[in-house]
Amino acid sequence: IRRRPVPDREILPPPGRIRSGPSIPSSHNRSFQLASPLILTPGWVISTFLIVSVIFIPLGVISLFASQDVCCFSFSFDLYDNDCIPAPARTNKVACIQGAAPKSCNRTLTVTKRMKKQPIYVYYQLENFYQNHRRYVKSRSDSQLTSPKFENQISACKPEDDATGGKPIVPCGLIAWSMFNDTYTLSRNNTPLAVNKKGIVWKSDKEHKFGNRVFPKNFQKGNLTGGATLNPDIPLSEQEDLIVWMRTAALPTFRKLYGKIETDLENGDTIHVTLQKKKLVLSTTSWLGGKNYFLGIAYLTVGGFYFFLALAFTIMYLVKPRLGDPSYLSWNRNPGGR
């Protein structure tokens, strides 16, 4: 009887007997060795905190200096002020406001700092106007704004969806219906001061969200008249006041761009303004935008916090250093256990 040859493989020891010699790691152990975690030594942690602080602190200082360089003047006007109410009607201001008399108010402003970085942007500011209300935000038809073939898509625009006779309103919805309708007339030292109302919208809004072949139809011809009216002979893409207003604000107090003054204002200039109850803001800009200290303060706060952590970890490491050698960890040892 011929004996079958024994295959060339390792013969397992009998049960209960421990095999001596170096152990061969399994595939699982090999994978664990390749994916060994990063050891966060004090040097790594302190260096990371220092790098973050070195980056964020200079950015915060630069942002604060950029915001400080912006000239911004804010002026509040109220029709209920005595200066805006004729003397005979000051005993009953509400009746005067609700009456048919003109509601304009003339006020005088004085520029206290030279505004030399033209253009100077003119904003109007509203308070307690909740453009972020869910029903208000949904009351619009984006498809109707882009193409005349979608002018009948007004199902989302209720209650300002159609006019008398069932004709669709273009643009429809509560947002367009309540469009800001105040006007400002400015003069400097008794000389008219021009306000350019072109180029005040986002390029993406003008080119992609409002069609150049869509014209207002039946606007402000419903049962109730809301805000401003629109010229039916000008396409929506050219009516920039509407485009600015249709970009809804997230908070109840907000500013929207009204126009641009394309000349410098000198210190001591007297500005005469005719307007209704609103807040008027004159502001220059920097490479960072308007006056806003939040970004600079945020950078300084984060950078300072990380610098404090780096300093604290350095002191702890010097006073009470961490004992131990990471080379003795299991995933850093050789397969043979050495």
Image: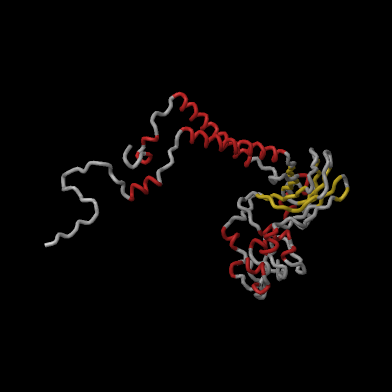
Seen at 59% across and 35% down, the residue is 54
- Give the image location of residue 16, x and y in percent: 16, 45
Seen at 80% across and 53% down, the residue is 195
Seen at 31% across and 46% down, the residue is 25
Location of residue 37 by image quarter? top left
In the rendered image, the residue lying farthest to the top is 319
- Give the image location of residue 183, x and y in percent: 77, 55
Q: Is residue 285 left or right of residue 131?
A: right
Residue 313 shows up from this direction: yes
In the rendered image, the residue lying farthest to the left is 1
Q: How many discs mark residues in the rendered view?
A: 0
Residue 149 or residue 62, whichever sits in front: 62
- Give the image location of residue 5, x and y in percent: 19, 58
Q: Quadrant of the N terminus?
A: bottom left
Residue 214 or residue 159, whichever sits in front: 214
Seen at 50% across and 28% down, the residue is 314
Residue 32 or residue 72, whichever sits in front: 32
Residue 92 shows up from this direction: no
Q: Quadrant of the C terminus?
A: top left
Location of residue 132 by image quarter? bottom right
